[in-house]
């Protein structure tokens, strides 16, 4: 059955194979010139010397990376020690993003499961309700959250009115607020891929497990989670990556103590006190982190496929 | 026995999820109708802050920003959609070709690179080639990052359309262009509309990249709102937020309907 | 009779895999010609080469003398009925049927009239304004037929068009297809894996396997006179026995059966030696003295027939079919029977 083993490649008889090049030129040009080239240029800039009015001088140097990782004293003449300021900011960002991802998973998985097990009609309504916030401007959502949880905002007032607390909770400008902001910003990104995975889940597997004496929660751990894992991992990536470089939530909801990568980079390009090479270097480091995460994810996926 | 689909507590979690997602939006919508000048006290129902948005001291600024936002979103979404249609036809109907996986990576690149990195890189690029930042630079940046958002629904739709429809058309004497216009394009339309709507909203939404490449004096709605919010949340901001919220809800409903129609034509 | 399609040494390769190994056959005008074979035998690939959806790697395809290899599908006066019909879901039934005429530049009024006549021919005039999704499978099938016939192609290609229908409808459509072919006088090339479909409708059948044509002939030819083991086994049910051929002369072979009996039978082989013989299970009778001796192992009741699963004294499995009549004497399992071969029941194969 030689013929049957080799499915005809797509595109036969539709005639598009001959014009693949022309069809793709706009994509190559737009993304190539306005994203790939800029990122390469950014890499180059991270090795240039800063100019004091903002901008760069074309002298190659490792100064930006040196400033990021090492402390050579106020005048640069002391023996170098590790500079913790920026590493701490990065570490805090990673930690915050990971925590936000975990919380999104804890809330998002039961929600996705619940939606996927509704009858078709109610499922559509739930899905619609979860999707709407995704389409609402992120800035507006963040501002709304700030309005809700601020010191004398509706949340504190209602809690006090109910007698649950006597003094307003100082939520804004804390790590908790940033956490809440990240969680609130990216929760739909967790629910949707997990929902897609659960929807494809064959519930007969759960029935088989129950038939073989597994309890509900054992079934969840031993059968459901391994099977829907690709959806969960996709959701985690979709929450973690944007959380890592988030700007709005830490900037609006956090304070000086909750400074994250996004704000650090942003600061380097504001006005004349900015430092472009340093900002470019910080962006390079952020991008490297994200690429590592994505590569690990891609590896795990191909391994999963090979099985 | 309630069946293997039931887990205690999952309903509560789902409800909690909705409450968390909607509480801030509902509160802000409510307070946008607050007659009081203070955001902390309730002064009765009023449209005054909506009137303020259109006629108040900030009105010219917001009108200009809204005009920029909407025209950029329309232009960027239209261009990105056209590019994405061509790309999806090549990727899905083009068979195997050299550089296909590289092209696939390229299309998805804007989704992989963190927004703040794209913002920095784009700013550096425009400043290096000496292009004055402003409307044009925002538009170019928006077209670029909108491409994958337009591409995903379009490609998904095209993947679901069997090639035999086009082959049947070609078999019945249609040229490649006719088969595209008369058969493929109408069948792809729900995906194209979804892609356009998604790209439109993404463009309208963008703050970080726009904020980097907009240059002095140029504002879009998000940057204008951000500028105002830095001095505290004023009631007129809540009115604008509520209007943008209404636009978003309208768009989701539209895309939802488009999908429903799309499913019906797919037999 | 003129030749409609002439296929000359067509080879089709996908990378390193070869789907067609030098296929040659010619199909006469007005013929109902069937390509029959199991899935993956290359029959659909050959059809798609004729339609122009695949380029041939080597060889020629001639349509009424003109080499059409290399022409785009829209430049070939050949139309296809697709396996899943491929009716344009966003167009009405009438628009679907009129599509080919529209592409050929026929005016709106003319093409509407002609499409209307086509719909009449397939008894679907009442459904002209419906969308394909609103029709049943059988109706969609007839729309697909009308659509492919409307531009009056020189050759109609049918790619397993009945496989999506249920049994009753399939049987009815066989008759309808055959009638339509006779009415229109168009050459039909029909692809199927269903031997019953092939045997009931076709003027001639090409049996294909592994990218090669194994045998071309009428239904009777390929059933009664298969050339090799593949054809004998694929068409109907048969017993294949390895035998020694003593002599071949004038198309008649002298064969020694397992057990020592010698018979003469028609042959596809030309040289003596080890070969296989095909014996149809319904062409045997149980008698006092026979050509073969077997032990009955199991009797299976099939309604119209009884099937005896037996084993020859020399060890080979052997199937026998008996008509289920009151007169039939059914041997009990375990009993030993002598089998008599009817005239022409056995045929010597080339391999």
Image (cartoon, coloured by chain):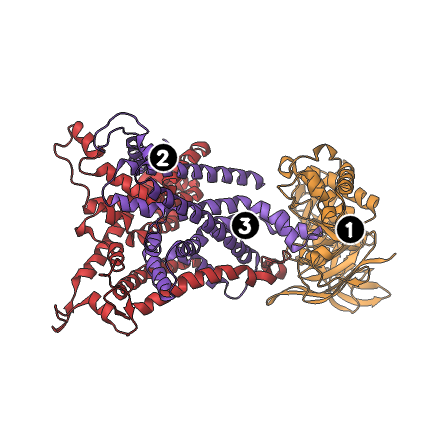
Chain colours: A red, B purple, C orange
Residue at 12 percent of width and 34 percent of height: A167
Chain letter, disc 2 residue: B
Which corner quadrant holds the N terminus of chain B? top left
Chain letter, disc 3 residue: B
Q: Which mark is residue C153?
A: 1
* Residue B190 at least partly seen: yes
Foreground of the two, A294 or A90: A90
* Residue C51 at least partly seen: no
x and y percent of residue B234 in the render? 26, 38
Q: Which mark is residue B246?
A: none
Q: Which mark is residue B6?
A: 2
Chain letter, disc 1 residue: C
Foreground of the two, B61 or A277: B61
Q: Which mark is residue B158?
A: 3
Q: Are discs 1 and 3 both within one chain?
A: no
Between the residue at mark 3 and the residue at mark 2, the CA separation in whole angstroms equals 36 Å
x and y percent of residue B111 in the render? 39, 55
Q: Secondary structure at mark 3?
A: helix
Q: Secondary structure at mark 2?
A: loop
x and y percent of residue A273 in the render? 22, 61
Q: How many marks?
A: 3
Crowding around mark 3 (Cα neighbors within 10 Å: few <14, some 14 to 19, many 20+) is many
């Amino acid at each position: 059955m030689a013929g049957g083993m080799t499915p005809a490649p797509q595109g036969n008889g539709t005639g598009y194979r001959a014009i693949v090049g022309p069809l793709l030129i706009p994509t190559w040009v737009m993304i190539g010139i306005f994203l790939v080239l800029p990122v390469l240029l950014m890499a180059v800039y991270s090795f240039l010397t800063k100019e004091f009015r903002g901008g760069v001088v074309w002298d190659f140097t490792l100064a930006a990376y040196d400033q990021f990782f090492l402390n050579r004293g106020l005048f640069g003449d002391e023996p170098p020690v590790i500079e913790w300021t920026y590493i701490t900011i990065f570490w805090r960002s990673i930690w915050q993003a990971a925590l936000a991802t975990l919380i999104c998973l804890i809330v998002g998985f039961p929600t996705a499961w619940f939606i996927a097990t509704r009858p078709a009609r109610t499922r559509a309504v739930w899905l619609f309700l979860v999707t709407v916030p995704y389409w609402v401007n992120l800035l507006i959502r963040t501002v709304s959250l700030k309005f809700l949880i601020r010191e004398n905002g509706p949340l504190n007032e209602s809690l006090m009115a109910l007698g649950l607390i006597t003094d307003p909770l100082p939520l804004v400008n804390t790590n908790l607020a940033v956490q809440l902001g990240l969680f609130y910003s990216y929760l739909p990104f967790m629910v949707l891929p997990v929902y897609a995975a659960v929807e494809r889940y064959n519930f007969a597997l759960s029935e088989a497990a129950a038939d073989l004496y597994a309890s509900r929660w054992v079934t969840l751990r031993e059968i459901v989670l391994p099977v829907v894992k690709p959806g969960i991992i996709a959701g985690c990536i979709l929450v973690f990556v944007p959380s890592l470089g988030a700007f709005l939530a830490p900037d609006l909801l956090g304070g000086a103590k909750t400074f994250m990568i996004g704000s650090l980079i942003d600061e380097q390009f504001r006005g004349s006190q900015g430092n472009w090479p340093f900002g470019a270097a910080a962006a390079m480091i952020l991008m490297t982190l994200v690429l590592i995460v994505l590569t690990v994810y891609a590896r795990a996926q191909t391994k999963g496929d090979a099985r | 026995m309630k069946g293997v689909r039931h887990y205690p507590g999952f309903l509560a979690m789902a409800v909690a999820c909705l409450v968390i997602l909607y509480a801030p939006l509902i509160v802000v919508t409510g307070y946008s109708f607050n007659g009081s000048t203070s955001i902390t006290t309730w002064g009765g129902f009023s449209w005054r802050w909506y009137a303020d948005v259109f006629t108040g001291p900030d009105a010219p600024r917001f009108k200009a920003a809204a005009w920029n936002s909407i025209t950029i979103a329309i232009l960027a979404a239209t261009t990105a959609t056209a590019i994405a249609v061509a790309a999806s036809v090549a990727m899905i109907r083009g068979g195997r070709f050299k550089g296909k996986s590289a092209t696939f990576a390229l299309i998805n690149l804007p989704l992989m690179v963190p927004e703040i990195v794209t913002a920095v890189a784009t700013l550096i690029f425009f400043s290096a080639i000496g292009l004055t930042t402003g409307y044009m630079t925002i538009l170019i940046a928006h077209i670029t990052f909108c491409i994958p958002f337009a591409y995903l629904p379009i490609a998904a739709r095209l993947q679901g359309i069997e090639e035999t429809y086009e082959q049947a058309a070609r078999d019945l004497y249609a040229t490649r262009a006719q088969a595209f216009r008369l058969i493929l394009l109408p069948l792809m339309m729900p995906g194209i509309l979804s892609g356009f709507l998604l790209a439109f909203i993404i463009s309208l939404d963008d703050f970080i990249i726009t904020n980097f490449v907009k240059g002095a004096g140029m504002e879009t709605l998000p940057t204008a709102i951000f500028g105002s919010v830095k001095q505290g949340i004023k009631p007129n901001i809540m009115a604008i937020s509520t209007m943008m919220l209404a636009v978003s809800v309208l768009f989701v409903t539209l895309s939802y309907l488009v999908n429903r129609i799309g499913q019906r034509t797919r037999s | 009779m003129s030749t409609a399609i002439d296929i000359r040494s067509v080879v089709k390769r996908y990378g390193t895999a070869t789907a067609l190994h030098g296929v040659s056959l010619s199909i006469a005008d007005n013929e109902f010609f069937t390509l029959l074979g199991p899935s993956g035998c290359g029959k659909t690939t050959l059809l798609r080469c004729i339609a122009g959806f695949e380029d041939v790697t080597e060889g020629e395809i001639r349509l009424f003398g003109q080499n059409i290899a290399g022409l785009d599908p829209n430049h070939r006066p050949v139309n296809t009925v697709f396996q899943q019909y491929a009716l344009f879901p966003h167009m009405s039934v009438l628009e679907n049927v009129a599509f080919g005429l529209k592409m050929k530049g026929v005016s709106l009024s003319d093409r509407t009239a002609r499409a209307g006549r086509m719909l009449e021919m397939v008894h679907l005039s009442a459904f002209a304004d419906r969308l394909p999704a609103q029709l049943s499978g059988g109706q969609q099938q007839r729309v697909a037929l009308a659509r492919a016939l409307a531009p009056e192609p020189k050759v109609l290609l049918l790619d397993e068009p009945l496989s999506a229908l249920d049994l009753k409808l399939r049987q009815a459509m066989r008759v309808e297809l055959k009638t339509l072919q006779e009415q229109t006088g168009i050459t039909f090339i029909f692809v199927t894996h269903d031997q019953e479909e092939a045997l009931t409708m076709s003027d001639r059948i090409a049996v294909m396997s592994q990218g090669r044509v194994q045998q071309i002939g009428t239904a009777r030819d390929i059933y009664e006179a298969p050339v090799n083991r593949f054809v004998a086994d694929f068409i109907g049910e048969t017993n294949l026995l390895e035998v020694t051929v003593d002599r071949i002369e004038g198309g008649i072979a002298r064969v020694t059966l397992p057990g020592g009996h010698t018979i003469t039978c028609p042959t596809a082989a030309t040289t003596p030696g080890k070969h296989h013989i095909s014996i149809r299970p319904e062409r045997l009778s149980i008698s006092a003295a026979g050509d073969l001796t077997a032990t009955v192992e199991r009797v299976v009741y099939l309604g119209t027939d009884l099937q005896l699963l037996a084993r020859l004294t020399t060890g080979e499995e052997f199937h026998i079919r008996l008509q289920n009549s009151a007169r039939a004497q059914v041997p009990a399992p375990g009993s030993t029977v002598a089998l008599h071969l009817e005239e022409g029941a056995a045929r010597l194969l080339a391999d």
